[in-house]
Image: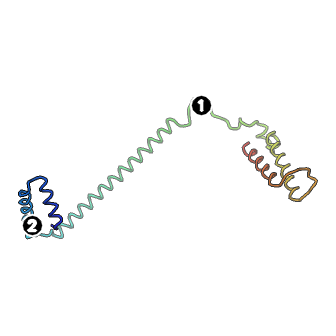
Amino acid sequence: MRDRAHENLIDLLQRFMDEPAARTAHEDIQAGERWLDAQPAPAPEARLLAALKMQMAVSVLRRHRTRRLVHASLAAAAAVIVLSLIGLFGPRSPSRSPMSYAAILPAAIWESDDLTADDLDLVYFASEIQQIEAQVQALDAEDSDTGVGGSPDEFETELMAIQTEFGKG
């Protein structure tokens, strides 16, 4: 051991024993270390090392396969549970009546070729958009007889607001 390690060992032994007993125990430990250093251990054979490495590799592969099998089983079980819950609490409930989305709009609108002409809200928004577009085009052409005050930016902002309302329906 190094000198610092010897000092730490003496301090540790002195916490449990009186100083002469700690010195004696330290000397015994040093004698044991010298004896072990004089008796080197034989190196294992290459075949034994190869066999140990192979056993460790097989053990690791088994654990890896087992974990992979467990994870796959858990994933399959989770999928089965989720699908069974969807089947039990799914959208097909006898208390609900099936909704016909075609019933939301009147049949006349469905059969029409011009939806904007049949819906009054759409007619209003379409006419507002056409009026603003005409005003913007007149301002861009710099016609002075439009009778409308304001800048093109204001008209474009109003046009965007109407188109947004139109999109909301």
Indicate the quadrant where residue 61 lies: bottom left
Please tell me which of labels 2 and 1 falls first in the chain: 2
Q: Amino acid at mark 2?
A: Leu
Where is residue 34? Give x, y as percent. Answer: 8, 68
Tell me the distance, in whole angstroms, between the alpha carbons under discs 2 and 1: 86 Å
Q: Is residue 96 left or right of residue 156?
A: left
Tag shown at residue 2: none
- Within 10 Å of disc 1 (Cα), the crowding (few <14, some 14-19, many 20+) is few
Q: Quadrant of the N terminus?
A: bottom left
The furthest residue to the front: 19
x and y, in percent, of residue 42 in the image: 11, 69
Mark 2: give few (<14), some (14-19) or many (20+) Cα within 10 Å: few
* Residue at 76% across, 47% down: 161
Three-letter amino acid code at disc 1? Arg
In the image, 59 versus 27, the foreground residue is 27
Q: Is residue 85 above or below residue 13?
A: above
Is residue 153 shown above or below 121?
A: below
Of residues 30 and 120, the one nearer the viewer is 30
Q: Secondary structure at mark 2?
A: helix
Q: Position of residue 126 (x, y in %)?
A: 82, 46
When the figure is inspected, residue 117 is found, relative to residue 96, above or below; the finding is below
Q: Residue at x 7, y 60 (%)?
A: 23
Residue situated furthest right in the rendering: 145
Instruction: Pinpoint residue 166: horizontal percent, then vertical percent.
Output: 76, 45
Q: Quadrant of the C terminus?
A: top right
Q: Which residue is mark 1?
A: 96
Check disc 2 and report the residue beneath it.
36
- Frontmost of labels 2 and 1 is 2
